[in-house]
Amino acid sequence: MTSREKVEALLKARSSRTSLTAFTDSEPGFSIEDGYAIQNAILNQAIQQGEKLSGFKMGLTSKAKQKDVSVFEPIRGFLLQSMEIVPNGVVELSTRIRPRAEPEIAIVLKEDLKGKNVMARDIVARIYGIYLACEIIDSRYKDYKFKLPDVIADNTSASGYLLGNVNLLPYLEHLRLMGITFRRNGEIVETGAPAGALGDPIMSLVELVRSLSKTDEGLLAGQVVLTGGLTNSHFILPRDVFEVECAYDRFSFSVKE
Ligand code: 0L1
Ligand code: MG
């Protein structure tokens, strides 16, 4: 399959809600670089069609998630404005294949930042806001079976995201170990802490900025960064109501067919 055919296959899988077999099954030479080239082509096509880049996401940053999909390296993807769902809003299943949800921390910078040697203190000095978040993922591969290059090509399964309304920046000192609960229909399904994302969501941002710098890109002020799932992810089903909560904020979303 050519690169163009891979892009088309992923876009068709999304629009027709029919999952694909991972490219590496038939093309073991399909590489991480090839995966990012496909991801970029999908982003460029979305921008040409009028979509707006709203930020980036880090994926597979927690041990729980890495074990779940047997991929043991963090990866990066992009976010589009059209993926954002208002807090306490509705997540639609009709445009997705087999979505799952995972609580996260999102960070927004107030100044642009790029560079391969960026440090945590460079990030901290530029934070505008830190938000409780939830990511909706939806692999375009059958049964979430893929290798690292496949999931990168599929924009790291990105499908949607919600951000809380409270800026947690005043609590930065306690962020890593702040407890987070994730409930489905009133029952706790997971508890976690922001330290679940590479030990500290700030370190996840460091990884992101360093990774973007390889192609001379950087983060822009105002862009949203999802720093990675803090727990395992959970399938979402019609009429489910999920709630994400920490000491200073909470929001929910319901799921509609
Ligand atoms: O955001 C994530 O951690 C998702 C990365 C891709 C793996 C998956 O689909 O679970
Ligand atoms: Mg995620």
Image (cartoon, helix red, strand yellow):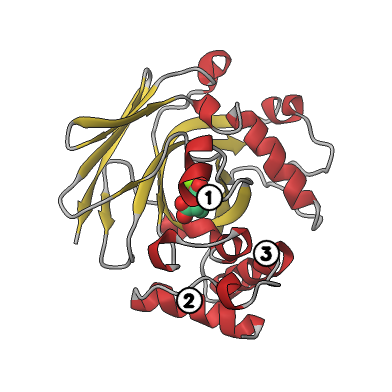
Give the Cα distance between marks 3 and 1: 19 Å
Of badges 2 and 1, the one in the foreground is 1
Tags 2 and 3 in contact by the CB under 8 Å rule? no
Q: Position of residue 166 (x, y in %)?
A: 41, 27
- Which numbered disc, 3 or 1, marks the residue that appears first in the sequence? 3
Q: Quadrant of the C terminus?
A: bottom left
Q: Quadrant of the N terminus?
A: bottom right
In the picture, the disc for residue 70 is 1
At numbered mark 2, what does the secondary structure look like: helix, strand or loop?
helix
At numbered mark 3, what does the secondary structure look like: helix, strand or loop?
helix
- Which numbered disc, 2 or 1, marks the residue that appears first in the sequence? 2
Residue named by callout 2: 11
* Identity of the residue drawn at 50% across and 75% down: 10
Tags 2 and 1 in contact by the CB under 8 Å rule? no
Q: Residue furthest top?
A: 173
- Which numbered disc, 2 or 3, marks the residue that appears first in the sequence? 2
Residue 25 in the image: above or below residue 221: below
Q: Horizontally, is 151 left or right of 94 in the view?
A: right
In the picture, the disc for residue 227 is none
Which amino acid type is shown beneath numbered disc 2?
Leu
Q: Nearer the viewer, residue 255 or 44?
A: 255
* Identity of the residue drawn at 52% across and 70% down: 22
Q: Position of residue 179 (x, y in %)?
A: 41, 20
* Identity of the residue drawn at 36% across and 46% down: 101
- Determine which quarter of the picture holds residue 29: bottom right
Q: Nearer the viewer, residue 183 or 130?
A: 183
Which amino acid type is shown beneath numbered disc 1?
Ser
Residue 41 in the image: above or below residue 205: below
Q: Horizontally, is 241 left or right of 117 in the view?
A: left
Give the Cα distance between marks 2 and 3: 15 Å
In the picture, the disc for residue 36 is 3
Q: Position of residue 34 (x, y in %)?
A: 70, 70
